[in-house]
Image (cartoon, rainbow, N blue to C red):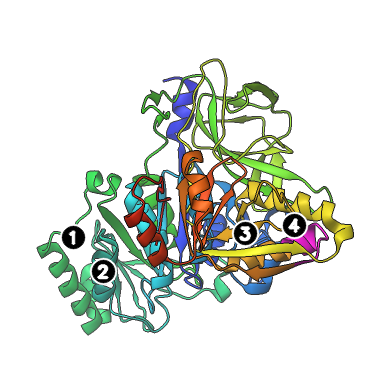
């Protein structure tokens, strides 16, 4: 086997998704603890090598609000593999960022709060995984706290997402009175023991079935009965169904106390597929050991305020990446030097010399690179365009200090390139008063905060009257502009978006003017 294929077989690239407060960020950091990327301290997890906190929520606004706003990339070793963990925003308002990250992942872990299950505002995040056929692992978190019955949660997952959970570990004791889990494969009982604020790996006492039955009594009997029911309905792991996104291996634990984290990481190594050949826009696969190619799925600016930097996150799709190699930027056809390439660990980074399929690298100050761009060596490849979500909220933004217009214009362009919001412009007005379009209103809050704090441009937002958008063409533009309750604006990539005041007005126009081009955008609610 070639070096590239051998290294690719060791990679596992996966995302973690959840609703807010399900424990995603806690689970992320505990994965790093088990992978040796973080060290255990006196009652808290600390960054390796004495550096700053390695929390994935590095952005100031994230720390203020206590939620994940932007995705981050974390690479660490576990067993004999290299794990690339893509942490994603948990709120529905940032589901577009999550979608882009999932395009770079080979599988996802769905984290659920055992007391809340699947919450309506984040159902779209889980549906995206299902729609893409992405292999999905499920982690029922916070089992050390009061919550719902496990069979009830399984029914909810199956009915609302359409994925069949196949439990790999099963709880003994009710949520809030957690005794441990039964490992279905070995039928061993692993007793739950608390750790001091989750600062060390969870102790695992293995107990055989006879002893567990004696010591746990009715709780053991109840768990065994539930497992027999699962066996009877065929809720058993089948690899083909998992890889097709039909079923989801399910694990139970408590990220805060570290219990169940090892089971989950072992599942990532044992069950999640290693990278496979990626298909170009015509559906032709590119072999893993073909010349280098990579896809940019995220752009992030100002992670280091002192340097005002800009990082393009690229997933290696084929071949071997070597720092300093000159690649071709597919969209422009121009050569691109990769002298400044880093592995990224939250906000921390280190120079990377080599990377393989499945790895994620950060290209620093790649000013011409955009989300969805392809980079390649020798053999050209163009990957399918990363689609934009249908915006549902619109707001006009203006700078309140005209002396700061230059900073405002620069900031708006940067936020547009990052995909923080979609920026729509009237070509006659340019950046005087562009319109921001978003999946959720919290995106406006992030845009305003970053413009004022990172770019020094004070702004005001005015809600717009529109509520739905369609992609249109040049031939339909003039007729649409002549209608009341309609406007046509442009994205930076040249796409025309027709905006309508209400879905009912859009339906009427579609009915009365069937010749107009009004195409739906992806992920419309």
Is residue 54 at all visible to an observer of this figure? yes
Name the element at disc 4: helix
Asked whether 457 falls inside the magenta stretch, the response is yes
Q: Residue at x 35, y 47 (%)?
A: 132
Expressed as whole percent of the image width and height from the top left, the position of residue 180 reads 35, 73
* Cα–Cα gap, marks 3 and 4: 41 Å
**Residue at the top extreme of this rendering:** 378
Determine the image quadrant of residue 281: top left
Choose the circle earlier in sequence order: 2 or 3.
2
Q: Residues within 10 Å of mark 4 (few under 14, many from 20)?
A: few
The residue mark sitting in front, 2 or 1, is 2
Choose the circle earlier in sequence order: 3 or 4.
4
Q: Residue at x 45, y 34 (%)?
A: 384
Tell me the tag on residue 488. none
Determine the image quadrant of residue 106: top left
Query: Which stretch is magenta?
Result: 450-459
| Residue under pointer 4 | 50
Name the element at disc 3: strand
Choose the circle earlier in sequence order: 1 or 3.
1
Name the element at disc 2: helix
Q: Is residue 514 left or right of residue 494?
A: left
């Amino acid at each position: 086997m070639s070096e590239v294929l051998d290294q690719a077989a060791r990679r596992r690239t996966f995302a973690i998704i959840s609703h807010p407060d399900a424990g995603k960020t806690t689970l992320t950091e505990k994965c790093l603890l088990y992978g040796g990327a973080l060290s255990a301290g006196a009652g808290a997890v600390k960054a390796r090598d004495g550096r700053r906190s390695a929390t994935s929520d590095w952005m100031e606004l994230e720390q203020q609000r206590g939620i994940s706003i932007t995705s981050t990339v974390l690479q660490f070793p576990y067993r004999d593999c290299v794990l690339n963990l893509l942490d994603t925003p948990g709120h529905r308002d940032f589901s577009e960022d999550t979608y882009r990250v999932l395009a770079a992942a080979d599988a996802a872990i769905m984290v659920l709060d055992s007391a809340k299950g699947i919450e309506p505002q984040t159902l779209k995040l889980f549906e995206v995984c299902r729609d893409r056929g992405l292999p999905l692992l499920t982690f029922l978190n916070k089992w050390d706290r009061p919550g719902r019955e496990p069979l009830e949660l399984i029914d909810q997952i199956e009915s609302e997402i359409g994925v069949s959970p196949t439990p790999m570990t099963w709880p003994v004791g009710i949520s809030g009175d957690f005794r441990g889990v039964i490992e279905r494969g070995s039928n061993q009982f692993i007793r739950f023991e608390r750790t001091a604020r989750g600062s060390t790996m969870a102790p695992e006492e293995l107990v055989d079935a006879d002893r567990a039955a004696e010591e746990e009594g009715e709780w053991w009997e109840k768990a065994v009965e539930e497992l027999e029911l699962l066996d009877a309905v065929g809720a058993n792991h089948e690899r083909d169904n998992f890889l097709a996104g039909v079923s989801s291996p399910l694990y139970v634990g408590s990220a805060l106390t570290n219990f169940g984290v090892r089971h989950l990481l072992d599942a990532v190594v044992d069950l999640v597929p290693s990278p496979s050949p990626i298909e170009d826009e015509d559906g032709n696969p590119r072999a893993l050991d073909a010349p280098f190619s990579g896809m940019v799925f995220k752009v992030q600016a100002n992670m280091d305020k002192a340097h005002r930097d800009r990082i393009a996150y690229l997933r290696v799709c084929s071949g071997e990446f070597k720092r300093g190699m000159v690649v071709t930027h597919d969209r422009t056809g121009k050569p691109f030097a990769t002298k400044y390439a880093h592995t990224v660990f939250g906000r921390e980074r280190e120079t990377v010399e080599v990377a393989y399929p499945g790895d994620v690298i950060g290209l620093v100050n790649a000013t011409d690179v955009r989300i969805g761009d392809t980079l390649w060596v020798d053999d050209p490849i163009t990957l399918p365009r990363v689609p934009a979500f249908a915006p549902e909220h619109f707001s006009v933004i203006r700078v309140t200090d005209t002396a700061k217009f230059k900073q405002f214009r620069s900031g708006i362009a940067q936020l547009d390139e990052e995909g923080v919001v979609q920026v729509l412009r009237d070509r006659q007005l340019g950046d005087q008063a562009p319109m921001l379009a978003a999946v959720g209103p919290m995106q406006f809050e992030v845009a305003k905060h970053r413009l004022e704090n990172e770019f020094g441009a004070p702004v005001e937002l005015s809600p717009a009257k529109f509520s739905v958008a369609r992609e249109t063409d040049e031939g339909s533009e003039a007729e649409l502009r002549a209608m009341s309750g309609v406007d046509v604006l442009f994205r930076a990539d040249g796409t025309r978006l027709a905006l309508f005041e209400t879905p009912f007005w859009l339906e009427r126009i579609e009915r009365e003017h069937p010749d107009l081009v009004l195409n739906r955008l992806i992920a419309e609610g």
